[in-house]
């Protein structure tokens, strides 16, 4: 473990904030879900796509249990199981894969995009899914496009599955010279509708989304595209879009009233709209959001919060819970720290914040036990043991599945953290 106390100059040089923050770098045992988990929200987002995991029975069980069992519905994900013969190199895994894909596409004529999702086993046997996707695309286009990305759990966390999927779509996007705003990252449809309505009120009419709601409705990209990230874990996608000439809008993330306001202001500013022209359009929604958050402030204010690294949402959540709910930040863990994408968030954290990057689960748990926070945000596997030790916990994965962005959801977001505290208080009685 390395302890790095960053100076103002170092953070400014890295595009970060002008505040000293303590950064712990940790490398050790990790307790996180793998990237296959993101199939759960991606397959709901694009109903004309199918996600075919090329992996083991373990991978199949993970996706199936994360997504819930759909006995009567035709699921839009599945697993091509690599058998012992494939793993031992006795069968040609490419031939097997081609056969499985043929069968699938014959049985499911509605599929328009097929994602081949790599896993730990397919990476270990070095199955080249990028090549397989090109070969299968040549065979099945124009009806079906085949795209590949990795959802493997080797050195990645579960939200990076979405990052890899979106980055794999970037080369497919049509080129455009037109000015447009591209919202990047999956949000619940109703949240996206609310935010797009606000952008339209501001006069921004060419707003596109990645991922699109229909996998073939690919948004255009070019030098006049401004990228506005909706999720903080899209490092590879942001850089791939920049590689296509698009410009990244520096902004915090739309969590909480202030985060949403700054996010919208940043996008509007990128199109030359002044803050005082934008503010009146946001005021009613801001008021509603503030009132909704205020209902939970009493329960959250002054409570000590410890976030273990899991979803990559931790830094924006910490900013919201400190700034708008008055929580005290004991430690903010993040699977990795992308200073470019986190600069606007880091700038708003208190100077005393300790950020830990990466995971060494034993050391982190030692610090949790030593400080006994009021609330620990962590992965599913750590929550039960910590609850048994008398600590209130919140599952980070729940935050990825819940609609939490924007003004109308700010109160619900605060409630998600107030609920475990209230439950523990009731149990006390
Ligand atoms: S991809 Fe790796 S970590 Fe994920 S379920 Fe499969 S074997 Fe496990």
Image: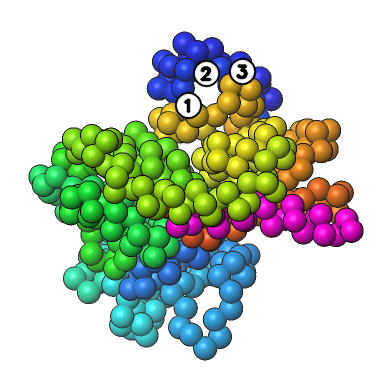
Residue drawn at 66 percent across, 33 percent down: 329
Q: Is residue 242 above or below residue 2?
A: below
Alpha-carbon distance for marks 2 and 3? Answer: 14 Å
Q: Is residue 136 above or below residue 410?
A: below
Q: Is residue 114 above or below residue 395?
A: below
Residue closer to the observer: 62 or 162:
162
Residue drawn at 47 percent across, 17 percent down: 18
Residue drawn at 40 percent across, 57 percent down: 186
- Regarding residue 386, the answer to whether it shows in the image is no
Magenta stretch bounds: 408-429
Residue 380 sits in which quadrant? bottom right
Q: Is there CB contact under 8 Å for labels 2 and 1?
A: yes
Q: Is mark 1 within 8 Å of ligand 1?
A: no
Residue closer to the observer: 298 or 225:
298
Q: How is this picture coloured?
A: rainbow
User: Label 2: which residue?
Assistant: 19
Mark 2: which secondary structure?
Answer: loop
Quadrant where the N terminus sits is top right
Mark 3: which secondary structure?
Answer: strand
């Amino acid at each position: 473990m390395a302890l790095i106390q960053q100076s103002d100059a170092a953070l400014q040089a890295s595009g970060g904030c002008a505040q000293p923050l303590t950064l712990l770098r940790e490398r050790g045992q990790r307790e996180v879900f793998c990237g296959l988990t993101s199939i759960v929200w991606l397959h709901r987002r694009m109903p004309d796509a199918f996600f075919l995991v090329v992996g083991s029975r373990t991978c199949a069980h993970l996706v199936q249990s994360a997504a819930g069992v759909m006995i009567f519905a035709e699921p839009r994900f599945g697993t091509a199981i690599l058998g012992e013969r494939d793993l031992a190199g006795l069968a040609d895994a490419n031939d097997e894969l081609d056969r499985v894909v043929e069968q699938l596409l014959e049985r499911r004529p509605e599929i328009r995009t097929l994602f081949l999702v790599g896993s730990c086993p397919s990476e270990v046997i070095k199955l080249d899914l990028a090549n397989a996707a090109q070969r299968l695309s040549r065979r099945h286009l124009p009806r079906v496009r085949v795209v590949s990305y990795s959802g493997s759990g080797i050195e990645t966390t579960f939200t990076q599955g979405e990052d890899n999927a979106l980055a794999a779509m970037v080369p497919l996007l049509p080129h455009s010279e037109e000015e447009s705003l591209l919202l990047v990252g999956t949000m619940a449809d109703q949240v996206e509708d609310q935010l797009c309505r606000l952008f339209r009120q501001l006069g921004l009419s060419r707003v596109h989304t990645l991922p699109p709601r229909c996998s073939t409705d690919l948004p255009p990209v070019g030098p006049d595209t401004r990228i506005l990230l909706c999720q903080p874990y899209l490092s590879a996608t942001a850089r791939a879009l920049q590689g296509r000439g698009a410009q990244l809008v520096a902004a915090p993330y739309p969590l909480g009233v202030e985060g949403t306001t700054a996010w919208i202001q940043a996008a509007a500013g990128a199109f030359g709209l002044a803050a005082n022209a934008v503010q009146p359009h946001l005021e009613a929604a801001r008021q509603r959001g503030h009132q909704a958050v205020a209902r939970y402030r009493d329960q959250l204010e002054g409570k000590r919060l410890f976030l273990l690294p899991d979803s990559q949402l931790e830094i924006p959540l910490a900013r919201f819970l400190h700034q708008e709910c008055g929580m005290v930040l004991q430690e903010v863990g993040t699977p990795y720290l992308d200073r470019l994408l986190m600069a606007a968030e880091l700038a708003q954290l208190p100077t005393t914040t300790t950020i830990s990057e990466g995971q060494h689960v034993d050391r982190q748990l030692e610090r949790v036990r030593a400080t006994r926070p009021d609330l620990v945000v962590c992965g599913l596997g750590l929550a039960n043991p910590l609850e048994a030790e008398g600590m209130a916990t919140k599952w980070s994965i729940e935050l990825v599945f819940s609609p939490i962005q924007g003004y109308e959801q700010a109160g619900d977001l605060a409630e998600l953290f107030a609920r475990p505290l209230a439950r523990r208080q009731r149990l006390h009685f």
